[in-house]
Image (cartoon, coloured by chain):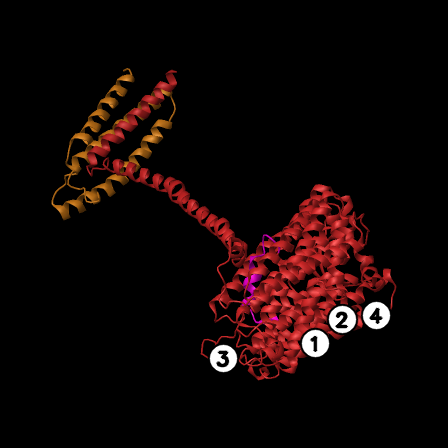
Amino acid sequence: MNPVNYLYLAALLFTIGAAGVLIRRNAIVIFMCIELMLNACNLAFVTFSRMHGNLDGQIIAFFTMVVAAAEVVIGLAIIVTIFRSRHSASVDDAGLLKL
Amino acid sequence: MENLIGLLVLVPLLGAGVLLCGGRRLDSSAPWIGTLLAALSFVIGAVLFAGMLGRDGEDRELGTTVFSWVPVGDFRADVGFQLDQLSMTFVLLITGVGSLIHLYSIGYMAHDERRRRFFGYLNLFLAAMLLLVVADNYLLLYVGWEGVGLASYLLIGFWQHKPSAATAAKKAFLVNRVGDVGLSIAIMLMFTTFGTFAFGPVLEGADRAGEGKLTAIGLVLLLAACGKSAQVPLQSWLGDAMEGPTPVSALIHAATMVTAGVYLITRSGAIFDGAPDAQTAVVTVGAVTLLFGAIVGCAKDDIKKALAGSTMSQIGYMILAAGLGPIGYAFAIMHLVTHGFFKAGLFLGAGSVMHGMNDEVDMRRYGGLRSYMPVTFVTFGLGYLAIIGFPGLSGFFSKDKIIEAAFAKGGTEGWILGGTALLGAAITAYYMTRVMILTFFGEKRWQPDAAGEPPHPHESPRTMTVPMIVLAFGSVFAGGLFSLNDAFLNWLEPVTGHAEGHSPVTAVQVTAATMVVLFVGVALAWAQYGRAPVPVTAPRGNVLVRAARRDLLQDDVNHIVLVRGGEHLTRSLVYLDHTVVDGVVNGTAASVGGLSGRMRRLQNGFARSYAVSMFGGAAVLVAATLLMRAV
C-alpha cells in the first residue's frame, strides 16, 4: 500500500483534532482532541520513518508518547481540580487569570 | 638659613592653630599670643634679610625643598620654598605691617567677645600670604592664594551677625573664585607647556614656548590677578569688604590679599615679556582701574569706602607698572611697599576716628576732629601727604616713577598711559583732600548715634596709636630711602631685571606736571569742601556723582549681565529640560503605555481564541518555511 495514504490519514486526523480544540468548550474533549493531534503526528513520524528507511521517526514517536502520557497526567489533574472548584469543565469559564 | 624660611610660614600658622583650637581659656591672652607670633615671624624675616644683605646680588636667592608633596610616576609636585629679593620684600612688608596691625587690633578689638578667633584668623591670613610669596612653584603658590581667599572670607564676615557683613564675605569669596579659576587654568596650561610648574624651569623656558601659549597663560594669570587685586572687571568685592573690622581692611589693603595680584604678575614677568598682547591687556586693566577706583573714591561719604576706592586706584598704578615690563616691575613693587605703609596708616587712622565717633563712618558727620585726636590727625595727615605724592614723602617717589615709566613705554600708548596716570594723580589729590577736610577740618557736624548718644571723640589707646606712628614714619621716609642711589632698584634688579625706556618727556617735566595736577586736585577739593559749608546729608548730585556713589554701577552691571543672564540661562535650561528631555522620555513612556493598552485587548481570557492564534501562527510559520524553500 502506498505510504502516502498514511500521511493523508495523519493530516486528516490532525485537522479533526485541531478543529476539535478550536471549536469545543469542554476541557476533556479538547484534551482528547490534543491526543488525537499528537497521535496524528506519531503516525506521520512512523510513516516517514518507513518511507526514508531509518528509525529516527519511530524513536521520536516513542518520545511523543512519553510526553503525551506526562501531559495527560498533569492536564487531567488540573481539569479535575478546576471541575471540583467551579463545577464546570468549560474552558470559556476558566478566565480568572485575566485582568 | 634655609630652614628659617619654612619657620617663617609655620609660626603664624601655629598661632592660627593654637588660637582657633585653644578654647576659652586662651580668650584673655589671645591678642598677645597672636601679636607675638606675628612679630616673631617678622624677626625671622629680619634675620633672613640681614643674612641676604651679607651676600652679593646674585647669590642672595635661597631655596629649599621640604618634602615631596605629590609624587606620582614622573609627575612631581614638591613643597619647596624660595626666598629671593622679591619674596624678601614681600615677607618684610607682610610681617612688618601685619605685626603692627595685630598690635593695633589689641586696642581696637578689646571689647569684642570673639577676639581669640579674630587673632587666629589674622595669623592664618599672614601664614597664607607668606606661603604665597615664598613658594617656589605655582602649585604651592596656589595653596597660599586659596588660603588668602579663605582668611579674607572669614575676616570680612567676622561680624557675621550683620547680614551685610555675611553677604560681603560671600561676595568677596565668589568674585575671588572667578580669579582663582584663572590661576588654576594658568597652572594647567603651564604644566602642558613646560611639564612642570616650578618657577625656575617655567620662567627660564618661557622664551622657548610659542607666543600664543604665553599670551594665553598671561591672560589667565591676569584674570587671577584681577580677582585678588580687585581690578576691573572683578573689582566689585573690595568696597563691600569694608564690612569687616577696620584692621582687616588695613591688612587686606596694605599687606596681604590685594598685593598678591601684583606679586603674581611681577613673578611671572618672563611670561608677560614674551607676550606683548597680554602686557597690553595688563596695562589696560591697570589704567582703567586706576581711574575707576579714583572716581569711586571721590563720591563715597563712607570714609572706609573712600579709602577702598583709593586702594583700587593705587593697585591700578601697580598693575599698570607691572604691565610695562622690565621698565616698570621694580617701581610697581616699590609703590606697593610705600603704599603698604601709607594705606595701612590711613586705614588705622580711619579706624581710630571711628573708634572715637561711636563707629560712625559717614564723613559728613565728622568735621573738626584735628584738635580732639591730635595723634590720629598727624599720622593720618602724613599718610595723606604721602598718598597724594607730596614732594619728599614716600608716595612722591614711587608714584612719580610709575608715571615716568608709563611715558617711557613710548609711542601713542606711552602718551595715553602717562596721561591716564597723571589724571589719576589729580583725582587722587582731590579725593584724599576731600577725606582730610571732611574729617579733620571745618565745623563739627557730629550727630548723635542710634541710641541718641552724642559722640565724645577722644584719642585712641596707646596700642592703636603706636602702630599709626610707626606707619607714619614709613609713609614719610620709605620712598626717600628706597630712592637713595636707586637702592630699591638695585636690590630688585637681579630678580625682575631693569630696562630704561625712551621717554619723550624728561623726569623733571614729569615731576613738574605731577606737581601741577596735584595742586589742581587739592585746590578743587578745598574750593568745594574747605570754603563752603558741608551739608550733613549728601546733595543729590549729578548723574556721574550718583553713578560713582553706586560704585560706577558695577553691581548693577554684574546684576544685569551675570545674575540676570544666569537666571535666563538656567530658566531656558529648565525649559529645555521640561520640553525636550522630559518630552522624549514621557513620550516614549506614553507610546509604550498606549500600545500595550491596545495589545492587552488580545488577551480576552478565552483559551480557545489563544489556541486560534497559536494555530494561525504555526500555519504562518509552515507557510513561510515552504515559501522560502520554494524560492
Q: Which mark is residue B45?
A: 2
Q: For the residues marked 3 and 4, what is the alpha-carbon distance in whole angstroms?
A: 54 Å
Q: Are marks 1 and 3 on the same chain?
A: yes
**Visible residue check, residue B136:** no
What chain does badge 2 belong to? Answer: B
- Give whichever of A73, B54 is nearer the camera: B54
List the residue tagged with mark 3. Answer: B454
Looking at the picture, which amino acid does disc 2 mark?
Gly
Q: Position of residue B128 (x, y in %)?
A: 66, 66
List the residue tagged with mark 1. Answer: B469
Q: Which structural element holds mark 4?
A: helix
Viewport quadrant of the N terminus of chain B: bottom right
Looking at the picture, which amino acid does disc 4 mark?
Gly
Looking at the picture, which amino acid does disc 3 mark?
Pro
Give the mark nearer the N terminus: 1 vs 3. Answer: 3
Does the magenta run of residues contain B243? yes
Looking at the picture, which amino acid does disc 1 mark?
Ile
Give the mark nearer the N terminus: 3 vs 4. Answer: 4
What chain does badge 1 belong to? Answer: B
Q: Which residues are magenta?
A: B231-247
Q: Which structural element holds mark 1?
A: helix
User: Any idea which chain is the orange one in this picture?
Assistant: A
- Compared across the picture, whether B629 is left or right of B107 comes to left
List the residue tagged with mark 4. Answer: B51
